[in-house]
Amino acid sequence: MAPVHPAGRFDAFRALADRRGACFACGAGQGLVLVRSEYPAALARMREAVGQAYACGHLGLSVHGTTTSVDIQVVDGAGSYVAGEETALIASLEGGRGCARPRPPYPTEHGLWDAPTVVNNAEPVSLSERFARPGCYEVELGTSVQRIVTELGGGLKDGAELVALQIGGPLGGFLAADSLDVLLSEAELSAWGAALGHAGLVAFDERVTPEEVLHHVWEFAAAESCGACSPCRVGSRRGLDMASAGTPPGQEWERLSRLLAEASLCAFGRRIPPAVHSLARAYGDRLAGWGP
């Protein structure tokens, strides 16, 4: 199974080929591709690609005359951000509420309808509208973030100066403009408190204040928390209150940070502290009190 989040030029057939390859690799006879219902164009493109794949013999019974049979179904998913988390995704597909479940058991042992299930996220590198050349790009893991920003993205529009770069999604993390000499890989990004996530890059220039970015991060966390666990449900709202107050949170944030990181049920709550810490690192003294 794979949730797909389109942005810019979305290559549905290539994404479908990746999913088919995953079925072949693990010996699965059935695959589900979940596309969020807020993206009707991507949903239509993916369904069209599946139809083409069946017509060409890439899917169905006896694929290209072999003994392998693979069926893939496209499903429109619920709009919750956390529904992309593997156990929440499975719960949603089963008709339940899209909330994270405790692990173990892991989906590879007991997944969709209690069958062994492999869950993958598919996403190309997408550059936000502030880049001179926004859109989706296919790059190899290990490519320099600096190269993606300057060569592929062409820097920022109107000659604006990059101040901070958000990478990997709303809770992925932030890099300062002078810290882009890092490779696009989970290991390298984690050293900076960031995460590869879905590899989206969002550029911020001087027109957006660090306080606005911080408030947006907490607003997102509070709105998208599934509410399944108290640390994330209550902690994200408390963090939003602190960010709205406009004063350095000090020791209260340190305590809340530890609680979110250690007691949250899934990666959503656990990702909030490193995302906020990386934002404070990127902006330096302008966000005093929010650092690690």
Image: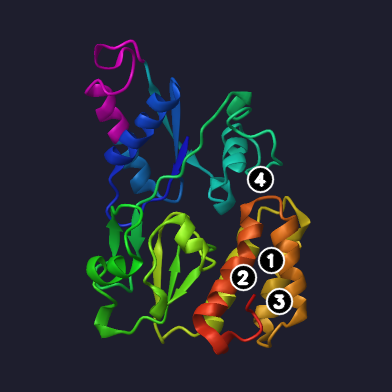
Q: Which residues are magenta?
A: 49-68
Horizontal side of 111 relative to 265 (left or right) equals: left
| Alpha-carbon span between mark 3 and mark 4 | 24 Å
Q: Residues within 10 Å of mark 4 (few under 14, many from 20)?
A: many
Q: Residue at x 40, y 31 (%)?
A: 22
Q: Residues within 10 Å of mark 1 (few under 14, many from 20)?
A: many
| Alpha-carbon span between mark 3 and mark 1 | 9 Å
Q: Which numbered marker is on residue 99?
A: 4
Amino acid type indicated by mark 4 = Cys
Q: Nearer the viewer, residue 154 or 223?
A: 154
Q: Nearer the viewer, residue 209 or 145?
A: 145
Amino acid type indicated by mark 1 = Ser
* Residue 44 in picture, x, y percent from top left: 33, 41
* Residue 223 in picture, x, y percent from top left: 62, 62
Q: Is residue 91 above or below residue 84?
A: above
Amino acid type indicated by mark 3 = Asp
Q: Nearer the viewer, residue 237 or 146?
A: 146
Q: Is residue 199 above or below residue 10?
A: below
Q: Is residue 69 above or below residue 290?
A: above
Residue with the mark numbered 2: 218
Asked if residue 210 lies in the magenta stretch, the reply is: no
| Alpha-carbon span between mark 4 and mark 1 | 16 Å
Query: Of callouts 2 and 3, which one flags the residue occurring earlier in the amino acid sequence?
Result: 2
Q: Residues within 10 Å of mark 3 (few under 14, many from 20)?
A: some
Query: Of callouts 2 and 4, which one flags the residue occurring earlier in the amino acid sequence?
Result: 4
Query: Of callouts 3 and 1, which one flags the residue occurring earlier in the amino acid sequence?
Result: 1
Q: Residue at x 72, y 75 (%)?
A: 253
Name the element at disc 1.
Answer: helix
Horizontal side of 253 relative to 286 (left or right) equals: right
Residue with the mark numbered 3: 241
